[in-house]
Image (cartoon, rainbow, N blue to C red):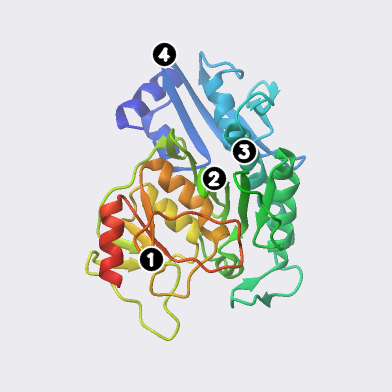
Amino acid sequence: MSGADVRTAALALGMPPGALAPAVHDPRLRVLVGGGQAALVRRQWHPDGFAEAVVLRRAAVPLEHPAVRALAAGWGCEQVRHGSTDRRRAVTGPGEGCSLADRFRHLAALAASRVEIAVGLARDSGEERTKDDGSPSLAADEAAHAAAVEVLGGLGVTVLSEERRDSAVADGEPWIVLDPLDGTGNFSAGLPPWAFSAALVRNGVPIAGLVTDLASGRRWTGLHGIGAERDGVPIEPRPGSTVVVPSGPSGRTVSVPSTARRVRVTGCTAVDLCLVADGAAAAWHDLDRSGTHVHDVAGGLAVLLAAGGAALDADGRPFLLEPDTETKIRFAAASSVAEAAALIAAVG
């Protein structure tokens, strides 16, 4: 949203532009403006324990407005409420006649909200343990898994998760893969980001995905052939000088590829790939490490590919996902095939 849009919305809503401007940078606030209409909407928690979209100010925008309802659904809200009158409308998802991808996106957003609640209630409960791959596991991981599967299971599609043994997926059948709480180590330390990540996959291609940074409220969505967004704003990758990596190589130093000037480690792979998708980083790779897992990358990869980015395996071939959460995978992701290939050559 441009400064001119903020001023237009502020004028319509009877607010000083300076009072509205911070909403542009807050993932839990959204300014809707266009066609002589404007609204300021906030995502918050209802006292009964669910997310709602509260219309704080509006000008010629009813609660039933498609943009308001779409925003509420994308936020994983169960209702829209007018802040002054307390009138409310339930948020309903796409019907059975809608595409599987559209129904997935709605339920994935709702699942992310349920996970927010679950991990908050599970924080500091139970004993921390270490998984076979050396990563930490908390009671919050299990709570997040249960909350997400309860929602996404309603699609009738096989759901694979970091927290369970894989179920078989027939050739050509769609499947969902999720990481209910990516960045468990960050979550345990109170160091952002940590995220909910989910993707709908068919024939190895993630056709829809959602990644929600549960620490900040930022969310990225992607739909194959349609495009990708961050907090409702269309995004696209771009070449640059920053590469993100999932960790430091075991027993080795972190190296800066010749194609970049800096390397960053966030501790949350799902968010890393989204940073490439929205142009905040130029590329991502795990080529000099032991590899990662499909549940770590599928949601972010769906966003990246929908945004126009590319992913190549270590041999430079188009990267496809397999319904296997145990096997380690290694690839490079960037704004284009050429940039991904250049990164592979630089690291190799």
The amino acid pointed to by label 4 is: Gly
Q: What element carries label 1?
A: loop
Q: What element carries label 2?
A: strand
What residue is disc 4 on?
Answer: 36
Gap in angstroms between the C-alphas marked 3 and 2? 9 Å
* Disc with the residue nearer the chain's start (4 vs 2): 4
Gap in angstroms between the C-alphas marked 4 and 3? 33 Å
* Disc with the residue nearer the chain's start (3 vs 1): 3
Residue 161 percent location from the top left of the image? 66, 57
Given this view, does label 1 or label 4 mark the residue nearer the observer?
1
Given this view, does label 2 or label 1 mark the residue nearer the observer?
1
* Disc with the residue nearer the chain's start (2 vs 1): 2
For the N terminus, the image quarter is top left
- Checking the image for residue 86, the label placed there is none
- Checking the image for residue 314, the label placed there is 1
Q: In this view, does 338 lie above or below 22?
A: below
The amino acid pointed to by label 2 is: Leu
The amino acid pointed to by label 3 is: Phe
Say if residue 154 shows up in the picture.
yes
What residue is disc 2 on?
Answer: 210
- Checking the image for residue 104, the label placed there is 3
The amino acid pointed to by label 1 is: Ala
Residue 64 percent location from the top left of the image? 61, 18
For the C terminus, the image quarter is bottom left
Q: What element carries label 4?
A: loop
Q: Quick check: marks 3 and 1 in contact, CB under 8 Å?
A: no
Q: Is mark 3 on a helix, strand or loop?
A: helix
